[in-house]
Image (cartoon, helix red, strand yellow):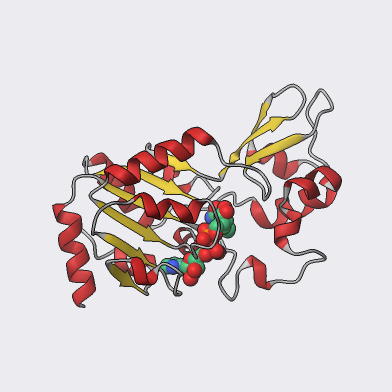
Amino acid sequence: MENLKKLKTWVQESKRIVFFGGAGVSTESGIPDFRSVDGLYNQKFDYPPETIISHSFFMKNPEYFFRFYREKMLPLGFSPNITHKKLAQWEEAGKLTAVITQNIDGLHQKAGSYRVLELHGSVLRNYCMKCHKGYSAEYVKNSQGICRCDCGGIVKPDVVLYEESLDSQVLEKSIYAIAQCDLLIVGGTSLTVYPAAGLLRYYPGHRLVLINRDETPYDNQADLVLHESLGKVFEQLP
Ligand code: CNA
């Protein structure tokens, strides 16, 4: 396949690769995404998922939030797949400067990546809203009803909910990494969640690669588009 051959060459030639990914990176580890046909958004709940995982809903109806969150958004016990692993290898080989992820599952770090910028936070960090004591994801998973701290405060997962803003330092580092990279690979994201999707505009080069099963609104701006599963592509990359 011509496109794959080109991508292989670009990976070989690059010294500052940045990978920007989303939920599609972890589907091959068994974690469902949001927008695929079997994703979370195509299942039926009392409220739309965007409503349940919004800041105002969390504040008004924390018990419902935690029920949904524990059942649908707390991916524990999953393992990294070939995509996570290859990215970690590229970092170790000194040819990848950052993985920017919209995922909250911690699988890039589990695969051995250190330079991970988590735009939407992580389920692995949880803090009491009153005294800021930290708690593990297992603590949240095993709690009943509203997850509470020893002090009585609510323990909030360190994930960015709808209506909340992104961490400005993570955002700045992501912009810097994208502006400096020589190959930007975007994969497993519908590129519909902002401001994350808007980061693509900071790439000044001519090696923007999109790897996604479905089409995205940015397909026509990419220099190379592969409508493939990430695992199939990454297992063939150097
Ligand atoms: P999304 O909107 O669900 O889009 C996922 C995209 O990935 C879709 O366009 C699919 O076609 C594509 N896709 C799915 N599997 C593969 C695959 N194996 N190979 C190639 N393409 C694939 O997800 P986004 O990340 O764009 O949306 C942003 C949300 C989803 C973020 O806020 C995440 O926190 C949130 N999310 C995260 C996780 C996780 O941490 N694993 C899981 C589900 C949702």
Residue drawn at the location 22% of the way across and 64% of the way down: 7
The percent coordinates of residue 169 (x first, y second) are 48, 33
Q: Which quadrant of the view contains residue 212?
A: bottom left
Which quarter of the rendering shows the C terminus? bottom left
Residue 192 is left or right of residue 236, and the answer is: right
* Vertical side of 207 occupied by 85: above or below: above
* Vertical side of 185 occupied by 147: above or below: above
Residue 199 is left or right of residue 12, and the answer is: right
Report if residue 65 is visible in the image.
Answer: yes
The percent coordinates of residue 218 (x first, y second) are 41, 67
Residue drawn at the location 24% of the way across and 65% of the way down: 236
Residue drawn at the location 65% of the way across and 53% of the way down: 73
Residue drawn at the location 19% of the way across and 63% of the way down: 8
Report if residue 84 is visible in the image.
Answer: no
The percent coordinates of residue 61 (x first, y second) are 85, 48
Residue closest to the eye, 77 or 181: 181
* Vertical side of 187 occupied by 56: above or below: above
Residue closest to the eye, 147 or 129: 129
